[in-house]
Amino acid sequence: MQAARRYFKSFASGFVVAVPVTVTFLDYVGYVARVEGASMQPFLNPEDRSFNDVVLLNRWSVRNFKVNRGDVVSLASPRDPEQRIIKRVIGLEGDTVKTRTYKNRYVRVPSGHCWVEGDNFGHSLDSNFFGPVSVGLVHARASHILWPPQRWQRIEPSLPTDRGPLDQETIDHLEEQGAVTIPKT
Amino acid sequence: MQAARRYFKSFASGFVVAVPVTVTFLDYVGYVARVEGASMQPFLNPEDRSFNDVVLLNRWSVRNFKVNRGDVVSLASPRDPEQRIIKRVIGLEGDTVKHTFQMPGTRTYKNRYVRVPSGHCWVEGDNFGHSLDSNFFGPVSVGLVHARASHILWPPQRWQRIEPSLPTDRGPLDQETIDHLEEQGAVTIPKT
């Protein structure tokens, strides 16, 4: 009886310590998550596979909200804070992007915001739908594909060939025409 | 020497445990913060006092992003994610709100009336004209809300529980007014 009681006490105190330690690790270092949906095809969850990719989400790298163009990030959806979406960062604050299906053709990304898109054009609810998103909504950076083993890889920041911020010459030209929308934020 | 080493080991293991326990508490239960600035006057940091209010910020109550009209909340600024601002929630998703003013020199909404999009809220500082809030940057994503200010803890004379309350002239419009405005096409529905 004595041994059982001591065991239970050790177990309980171990448990009580393990929870905060684990929670702190998941919140400040990172965790693992399965990718749902087709918005990042073919990069994530490509069609020829029947199961979803599992990625490593790095929380530490976004603790100061420093994201890079081409990063694949997990963020809280502007339309529903409880929903997490995974997209690629196409433009940062100050960039001018050519949008795909947004109400304005050319948009200057406001300060504190970024422009995100799913790689799968036409099958992604992203900035082309809800506009620039506050960087404060970015939760983690996807650093690796962990599963399936054949797809194990480190995720490097990379912009699709035809997506990205415009160069200064094009911007100057468009601004002369008054074609660049600067959203109010 | 043995005693010192044992002491050090106990200290180290206590320390290693205390950090995650404390961090988890601050992140999931709440913490205390000093209010800077005059944007929430006279409710917070009233002018007749020389020192700033200290409030209790409740993280647990916003874990599901359920905010109420009239709540005083701390949120990441849409203009700079590293900056925390404290404002009052005036409208929730689906509400129609009226701009109190439009900052001179900025691009402003065409209409005075705005429908708060889903997943967003409309926040304002109580101090009209001295607050950078939704009147300046529009509706904010609820995902940016970090905590609800539940109590003023300091100074002791101002100790109080903070109840959700809308200023008399601020709040979402009633349905009759909304219908009337919509007929005139006067309500802006931001695209999000």
Image: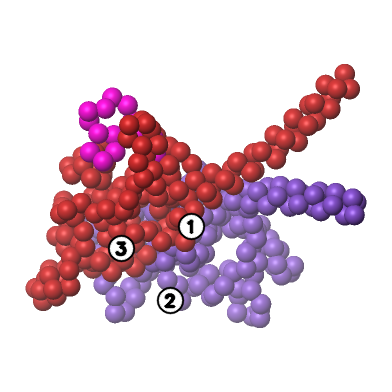
Chain colours: A red, B purple
Residue A1 pos. (x, y %): 87, 18
Residue B66 is inside the magenta segment: no
- Helix or strand or loop: what does disc 2 sit on? loop
> Which residue occupies 68% across, 52% down?
B19
User: Which of the chains bears the disc numbered 2?
Assistant: B
Would you place residue A54 above or below residue B140 in this image? above
The residue that mark 1 highlights is A63
Q: Which residue is mark 2?
A: B129
* Residue at 32% in and 26% down: A51
Classify mark 1: residues with Cα within 10 Å, few (<14), some (14-19) or many (20+).
some
Q: Give the chain letter at badge 3.
A: A
Q: Position of residue A157 (x, y in %)?
A: 31, 53
Alpha-carbon span between mark 3 and mark 1: 17 Å
* Distance from the alpha carbon under mark 3 to that under mark 2: 30 Å
Residue beneath the point at 60% across and 73% down: B45
For the residue pair A99 and B89, the one nearer the viewer reads as A99
The quadrant where residue B159 appears: bottom right
Q: Where does the magenta region start and end? A: A42-55
Q: Which residue is mark 3?
A: A92
The subunit carrying tag 1 is A
Q: Specify whether residue B63 is in view.
A: no
| Whether marks 3 and 1 lie on the same chain | yes
Callout 1 secondary element = loop
Judge from the rendering whether residue B178 lies leftward or rightward of residue B37; answer left or right: left
Q: Nearer the viewer, mark 3 or mark 2?
A: 3
Question: Which callout, 1 or 2, points to the residue nearer the camera?
Answer: 1
B146 sits to left or right of B186: right
